[in-house]
Image (spheres, rainbow, N blue to C red):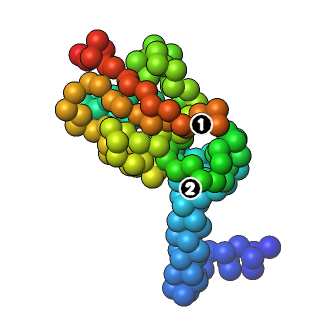
């Protein structure tokens, strides 16, 4: 037993420490990539609320479309955009019928490829009216979200 304790107290050679650090770094990077891509069922995709200050679409949380979200909301492969994960009930977006599972395909006629696009396209809005092309229930349609009454 004393021999085992002695071996555990001895410093590890530097090569072992470097290898352990490299493995830990690789594992962390892989985990972050999986979570942000929504590729791991144990860790759902990261959702990003659209900016609630200078931006439009306050109270809407979006994430990227991936295999998991396509299956969850029955979204066809040819649909591109950002999937809505949550809408605050008291928001202008909820008032026009946006809900979880809708896919934002365009914002003010600009295509949306992913959640990052959706966030970028709602930042620094010129006015509080946002034209959306949204896929839901098997088809695409346009909606206007008017947040002019909600502007603070």
Q: Position of residue 103 (x, y in %)?
A: 53, 39
Q: Quadrant of the N terminus?
A: bottom right
User: Which residue shows up at 28% across the image and 39% down it?
Assistant: 123
Name the foreground residue: 99 vs 46: 99
Q: Secondary structure at mark 2?
A: helix
Q: Left or right: where does residue 61 sit relative to residue 101?
A: left
User: Which residue shows up at 44% across the image and 22% down it?
Assistant: 93
Q: Position of residue 132 (x, y in %)?
A: 41, 34
- Of callouts 2 and 1, the N-terminal one: 2
User: Which residue shows up at 57% across the image and 81% down it?
Assistant: 19
Position of residue 105 relative to residue 113, above or below, is above
Circle 1 Cα neighbour tier, 10 Å, few/some/many (<14 / 14–19 / ≥20): few
Mark 2 lies on residue: 37
Q: Which mark's residue is nearer the viewer, 2 or 1?
A: 1
Name the foreground residue: 106 vs 25: 106
User: Which residue shows up at 42% across the image and 18% down it?
Assistant: 91
Position of residue 49 relative to residue 44, above or below, is above
Q: Residue 149's quadrant in the figure?
A: top left
Name the foreground residue: 145 vs 1: 145
Q: Position of residue 76 (x, y in %)?
A: 65, 48
Q: Secondary structure at mark 1?
A: strand
Question: Residue 119, can we see it?
Answer: no
Q: Left or right: where does residue 80 sit relative to residue 132?
A: right
Circle 2 Cα neighbour tier, 10 Å, few/some/many (<14 / 14–19 / ≥20): some
Query: How far separated are the C-alphas under marks 2 and 1?
Result: 25 Å
Mark 1 lies on residue: 139
Q: Quadrant of the C terminus?
A: top left
Q: Position of residue 49 (x, y in %)?
A: 43, 35
* Residue 78, disc: none
């Amino acid at each position: 037993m004393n021999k085992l304790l002695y071996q555990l107290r001895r410093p590890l050679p530097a090569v072992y420490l470097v290898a352990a650090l490299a493995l830990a770094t690789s594992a962390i990077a892989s985990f972050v990539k999986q979570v942000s891509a929504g590729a791991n069922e144990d860790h759902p995709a990261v959702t990003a609320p659209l900016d609630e200050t200078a931006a439009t679409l306050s109270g809407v949380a979006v994430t990227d479309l991936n295999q998991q979200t396509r299956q969850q909301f029955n979204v066809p492969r040819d649909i591109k955009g950002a999937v809505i994960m949550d809408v605050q009930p008291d928001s202008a977006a909820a008032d026009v019928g946006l809900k979880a599972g809708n896919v934002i395909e365009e914002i003010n006629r600009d295509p949306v490829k992913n959640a990052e696009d959706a966030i970028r396209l709602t930042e620094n809005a010129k006015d509080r009216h946002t034209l959306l092309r949204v896929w839901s229930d098997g088809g695409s349609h346009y909606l206007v979200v008017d947040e002019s009454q909600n502007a603070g």
